[in-house]
C-alpha cells in the first residue's frame, strides 16, 4: 500500500525474526507459528493488521523474480481468473502462465501454488491478530478484530471458488495441528465461516476507509457470497446492495477513466493500493499487459480475445476506447497503464519504469454493486422489471452511452446483465466468478475452447490443489477430480 509497507516492513521483521525467512514469505502450513513476544501494544496490533494488507499486495516480480521466495498476493490473479475465461489470454504458449488460458493447469503450476499460499498467508496473519487482540486498546479491539475477519473472509472467498473444499484454519496453529492444517472442509463449512466473519465486520465497521476494510466492503462481498454459496440467498444479497446504495457514501464516477486513474475515488469501495516508482510499493502486472512493445518480463498477458472485442463493439460505448487498444496484431488492456504512459504516440511510451507501476488493484467498486442488485432481483428467474434495479442498471448504461442518455430500460434479462458485467468490469478479474455464479461457465467456456482450439472439460472449473501442499501433508490433503 502507498504508505503501509513502511510501517509493516519494520514490524514484520521483528515478529518473525526467529523464523526462516523463505518460509515466512511463502509459508508452508506446517511451519506457521505464533510469536508471543511481539504484540505488546496497540501500535503493534495495528502494524500487524496493516501487514495483512501487505500480504494481499504481494511482492513485485520486478523486485524479486524468484517465485520460490515470495508471494505475489493478487498480482497473479488475472492468470487464475481472466485468463481462464473467454476474455483474455497469454500472448505466448510457453511457460506455466500460458497453461491457464488453455485449461492445462496441473498441480505443480507455480502461479497457482503461489496464489494459494498468498491467500493462506492473509489468513494466517489475520488469525495471528485475532489471537492477540486483547493486547490492543479496549476501544480498538472490536474494530481490529472485525477488520482481520473481513480480510480472512475475503481470502477464503477467493480460495473456495477457485479450489472448492480447502482447510479451514481459524486460529493460530502449530506444526502438530495436522487435523486442522490438512483436512479439506466442505464448501458449506467454508462459506458458513465466511458469512460469520463478514456479518461481524458489517456490525462493527464503518465506511471510513477505501484501502482498508469497511462496512460497505463487507456488505458487497457478503452479497456476492450469498449469490454464490451452495444455498443462495438472493433476498439477503439485495438488502445488502440496497444498504450500500442508500448509504450515500458512494457514487459512479462521471468519467469512466477516472475510476482507474483518480484513485480511491467516489466509486471505489475497496482497493489494494500500490505506489509508482518504489520497488517495495509497486506492482508489475500492469507492465505484463503490454505485448506489441513489451514492457514486462513476459511476452504479454491479458491479451484481449476477439469475442470480447465484438461484445465491446455492441455494448461498450465510451468504455471501449478506455479499456483496450489495438497495436499491430496485439489487442492490449489499457485500463491499468502505468503512470506516465502515452498511447497517443507511436510507438507508445509506458512511463519511466513500467515494471514499477502504481495502479491500484480495484477489488470492489460501486458499479459492481449496482449490477449485483439486478442479479439479486432476477434471482432464479430470467429477467426483472423491478424499478430499483432498472434505475441502478440505467446509471451504468447512461455513463457508457452519454450521447443517448437517459437510456430508457424497461427490463433486464440475465443474458443482458451478464453482457453488461462483462464490458463494465472487463480485466478486473470478475468474469470467471460471474460465469460460475450465473451457471453458464461450462457452456460458455466449451464454446470458447472450440473456437480457439483448446480442450475444455468440466475438471477445469476447479484448479488443482497444489502438489506441494499435498506432499507436505503426507497425502492427507486430497486432490480435486481429474488431476
Image (cartoon, rainbow, N blue to C red):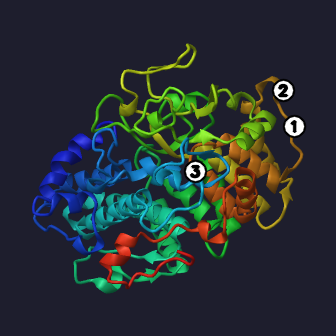
Q: Is residue 171 left or right of residue 36?
A: right
The vertical placement of 379 against 359, above or below, is below
Q: Is residue 467 visible?
A: yes
Residue located 25% across and 55% down the image: 48
Report the disc number at residue 404.
Answer: 2
Q: Nearer the viewer, residue 184 or 262?
A: 184
Residue bearing mark 3:
83
Q: Nearer the viewer, residue 62 or 373?
A: 62
Residue 388 locus on image (x, y percent):
77, 49
The residues bearing labels 1 and 2 have C-alpha atoms spaced at a distance of 9 Å
The vertical placement of 155 against 89, above or below, is below
Residue 36 locus on image (x, y percent):
13, 68
Q: Mark 3 and mark 1 in contact (Cβ < 8 Å)?
A: no
Q: Nearer the viewer, mark 1 or mark 3?
A: 3
What is the secondary structure assignment of the residue under circle 2?
A: helix
Q: Is residue 388 visible?
A: no
Quadrant of the image for the N terminus? top left
Q: Is residue 458 left or right of residue 260?
A: right
* Residue 267 lies in quadrant: top right
Residue bearing mark 1:
408
Q: Earlier in the sequence, mark 1 or mark 3?
A: 3
Residue 181 locus on image (x, y percent):
33, 79
The crowd level at tag 3 (other Cα within 10 Å; few <14, some 14-19, many 20+) is: many
Amino acid at each position: 500500500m502507498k504508505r503501509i509497507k513502511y510501517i509493516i516492513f519494520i514490524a514484520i521483521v521483528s515478529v518473525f525474526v526467529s523464523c526462516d525467512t523463505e518460509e515466512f514469505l511463502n509459508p508452508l502450513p506446517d511451519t506457521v507459528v505464533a510469536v508471543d513476544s511481539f504484540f505488546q501494544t496497540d501500535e503493534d496490533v495495528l502494524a500487524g493488521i496493516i501487514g495483512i494488507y501487505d500480504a494481499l499486495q504481494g511482492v513485485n516480480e520486478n523486485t524479486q523474480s524468484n517465485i520460490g521466495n515470495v508471494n505475489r498476493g493478487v498480482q497473479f490473479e488475472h492468470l487464475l481468473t481472466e485468463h481462464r475465461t473467454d476474455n483474455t489470454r497469454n500472448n505466448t504458449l510457453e511457460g506455466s502462465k500460458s497453461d491457464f488460458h488453455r485449461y492445462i493447469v496441473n498441480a505443480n503450476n507455480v502461479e497457482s501454488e503461489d496464489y494459494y499460499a498468498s491467500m493462506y498467508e492473509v489468513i494466517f496473519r489475520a488469525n495471528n491478530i485475532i489471537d492477540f487482540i486483547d493486547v490492543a486498546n479496549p476501544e480498538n479491539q472490536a474494530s481490529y478484530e472485525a477488520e482481520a475477519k473481513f480480510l480472512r473472509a475475503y481470502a477464503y472467498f477467493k480460495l473456495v471458488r477457485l479450489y472448492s473444499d480447502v482447510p479451514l484454519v481459524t486460529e493460530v496453529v502449530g506444526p502438530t495441528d495436522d487435523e486442522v492444517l490438512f483436512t479439506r472442509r466442505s464448501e458449506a463449512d467454508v462459506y458458513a465461516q465466511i458469512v460469520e466473519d463478514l456479518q461481524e465486520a458489517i456490525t462493527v465497521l464503518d465506511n471510513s476507509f477505501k484501502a482498508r476494510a469497511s462496512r460497505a466492503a463487507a456488505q458487497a462481498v457478503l452479497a456476492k457470497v450469498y449469490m454464490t454459496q451452495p444455498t443462495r440467498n438472493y433476498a439477503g444479497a439485495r438488502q445488502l446492495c440496497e444498504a450500500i446504495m442508500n448509504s450515500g457514501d458512494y457514487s459512479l464516477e462521471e468519467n469512466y477513466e477516472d475510476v482507474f486513474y483518480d484513485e480511491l475515488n467516489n466509486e471505489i469501495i475497496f482497493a489494494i493500493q500500490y505506489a509508482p516508482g518504489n520497488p517495495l510499493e509497486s506492482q508489475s502486472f500492469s507492465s505484463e499487459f503490454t505485448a506489441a512493445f513489451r514492457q514486462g518480463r513476459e511476452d504479454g498477458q491479458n491479451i484481449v480475445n476477439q469475442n470480447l472485442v465484438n461484445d465491446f463493439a455492441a455494448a461498450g460505448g465510451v468504455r471501449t476506447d478506455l479499456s483496450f487498444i489495438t497495436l499491430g496484431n496485439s489487442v492490449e488492456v489499457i485500463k491499468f497503464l502505468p503512470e506516465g504512459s502515452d498511447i497517443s504516440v507511436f510507438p507508445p511510451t509506458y512511463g519511466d519504469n513500467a515494471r514499477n507501476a502504481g495502479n491500484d488493484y480495484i477489488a470492489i467498486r460501486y458499479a459492481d454493486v449496482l449490477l449485483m442488485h439486478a442479479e439479486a432481483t432476477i434471482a432464479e428467474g430470467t429477467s426483472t422489471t423491478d424499478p430499483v434495479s432498472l434505475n441502478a442498471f440505467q446509471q451504468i448504461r447512461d455513463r457508457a452511452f452519454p450521447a443517448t442518455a437517459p437510456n430508457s430500460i424497461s427490463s433486464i434479462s440475465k443474458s443482458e446483465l451478464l453482457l453488461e458485467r462483462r464490458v463494465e468490469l472487463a480485466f478486473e478479474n470478475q468474469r470467471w466468478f460471474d460465469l460460475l455464479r450465473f451457471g453458464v461457465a461450462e457452456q460458455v467456456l466449451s464454446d470458447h475452447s472450440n473456437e480457439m482450439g483448446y480442450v475444455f472439460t468440466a475438471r477445469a472449473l476447479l484448479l488443482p490443489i497444489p502438489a506441494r501442499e499435498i506432499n507436505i501433508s503426507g497425502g492427507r490433503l486430497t486432490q480435486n477430480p481429474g488431476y
